[in-house]
Image (tube, rainbow, N blue to C red):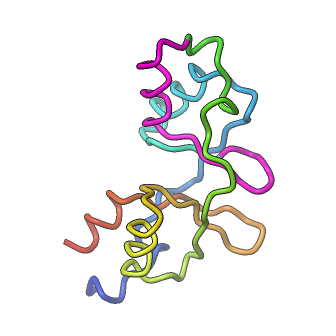
Amino acid sequence: MAAANRTVEDVMSTPLEMVSKDETLAEAAATMRDSEISALVVSTDPPSIVTSTDLVAAAAEGHDPTDRRVADVMTKSVETVPPNLYLEEVAAMMTTFGIKHLPVEDGDDYLGMVSSTDVTSALS
């Protein structure tokens, strides 16, 4: 399939891993490690996200990952994308908003996550 015709659905990671805002950073890190991913959607309304970068920043600031909660470091009210969005449009969104992960949403259902790594791999 030509890169110009690829959509989010073609490259997104599934299933989507979610975490509660009340979980500790250590629990979120374990979920990321076990699932071999670098971002989790936080089950808030609207959705939020916590990334490995957030966890590293908290550690660098000296915070105890067993004491701090996901709610302390998550990015609130994140952008989402539909599964049929073309990757060029996703790349433009990531550049415009300075983000590396976008939850994939179809109506009220979360289907997966698309990352800048997914987009780069597909477009190269």
Vertical arrangement, residue 74 with respect to residue 23, above or below = below
Q: Image point 75% across, 74% down: which residue?
A: 107
Residue 83's image quarter?
Answer: bottom right
67 part of magenta stretch: no
Q: Residue furthest left?
A: 124
- Horizontal side of residue 66 vs 61, given as left or right: right
Vertical arrangement, residue 85 with respect to residue 23, above or below = below
Vertical arrangement, residue 102 with respect to residue 40, above or below = below
Q: Image point 52% across, 25% down: which residue?
A: 30
Locate the C terminus and report the quarter of the image it occupies: bottom left
Give percent across and percent down for residue 40. Answer: 57, 43
Give percent across and percent down for residue 90. Answer: 44, 74
59 part of magenta stretch: yes
Vertical arrangement, residue 53 with respect to residue 98, above or below = above
Magenta stretch, residue numbers: 42-63
Q: How many marks?
A: 0
Q: Image point 60% across, 33% down: which residue?
A: 73
Residue closer to the observer: 87 or 60: 60
Residue closer to the observer: 61 or 64: 61
- Horizontal side of residue 15 vs 42, given as left or right: left
Q: Image point 44% across, 42% down: which residue?
A: 37
Locate the N terminus and report the quarter of the image it occupies: bottom left
Give percent across and percent down for residue 95. Answer: 38, 67
